[in-house]
Amino acid sequence: MGLMRYTARRLAQAVPVVMGITLITFLLTDAIPGDPVSIMLGPSPSAQQAAAIRAQFGLDRPLYVRYFNYLLSVLQGDLGQSLYYGVPVTRKIAERLPVTILLLASSFAFAIAAAVPLGIISAKRRNKPTDHVSRVVALVGVSTPSFWIGLMLIIIFAYQVQWFPATSLVLPWAPVSAVDGASSRIDVLVIAAKHLTLPTLSLGTLQMAAITRIERSSMLEVLSAEYVKLARAYGVPETTILRRHAFRNAQLPVITIVGLQLTTAIGGAVLTETVFSISGMGTLILTAIVNQDFQLVMGTTLVLGLVFVVGVVVTDISYAYVDPRVSYGEGE
């Protein structure tokens, strides 16, 4: 019950955050220069057509009225009608969100799988050539923009050696008949993996570098603790010390940085999807902003904000599974 109460409390605390996201986004979207009606109907629409469109989408009402009406619609599960696409916002988000979630999940899987061993090896071999190489790799990864990494990957692996495709993305759950060159489900998975490789490396490099640095520093701190020195004095093998005594205790800072990196990953997904021409939430947001599609901007921002909030709550809850000393009130 303690964990459930804590989760409920954290979700309740997230409500003002989500409200703030909607308010700021609504004000910024309204402040964008231009007229969405002109974008929809052309530069010289008739007065009757413009008035009809404004009345249909509520653009003729005061700002505060439109905002509160939008909140009421959101509470009813209605994110409005897209001005640009002419379909419900929820439909477009349902089409694009799985693509972005797949990209985020694959990039974090790559980042964690590469960063944790790299950080452990770097800490174990402190001030040796392996450590220096690891630190340089992490520094370069943190300092390099994801879009530049994506462009370099396209030039090298898509055009020079032609190992991977440069654009688009094939979803692993796509029907076999919808994927060119696929005759079975395994073929679809292989083609999807090839399409996903370069975007994953592009988006996951920054996360990998940040996690590596935290993993290294956290492992160094734990390996210098008194109980580790005592274990060494008793002749416990170094591998056992790393696996049973040091690794788990060093993961709380790593979990924290993984949760914080979610914001960076969501922002990087916009650039990554643009570079690789992936039809995800990132390109959907850009299209909405360029065309002043207020409803679509609000809907995509709200959904990505919810993704971040859920990610932070999951990060907090995972502390208890890694470190038994962390309690959420079960013993109260």
Image (spheres, helix red, strand yellow):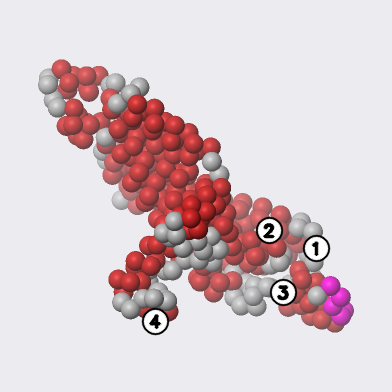
Residue 45 in the magenta stretch? The answer is yes
Dot 1: element: loop
Span colored in magenta: 43-47
> Left or right of 193: which side holds 32?
right
Label 1 – label 4 distance at C-alpha: 43 Å
> Left or right of 213: which side holds 94?
right
Mark closer to the chain start, 2 or 4 = 2
> Left or right of 110: which side holds 49?
right
Q: Looking at the image, which residue is at 61% across and 61% down?
A: 285
Q: Which quarter of the rendering shows the C terminus? A: top left
Q: Are marks 3 and 2 in contact (CB under 8 Å)?
A: no
Residue identified by numbered label 3: 57
Q: For mark 1, does the 10 Å Cα neighbourhood hold few (<14), some (14 to 19), or many (20 or more) residues?
A: few
| Three-letter code, disc 2 | Phe
- Quadrant of the rendered image containing residue 122: top left
The secondary structure that most of the magenta stretch takes on is loop
Residue identified by numbered label 2: 26
Mark closer to the chain start, 1 or 3 = 1
- Quadrant of the rendered image containing residue 114: top left
Residue identified by numbered label 1: 34
Label 1 – label 3 distance at C-alpha: 16 Å
Mark closer to the chain start, 1 or 2 = 2
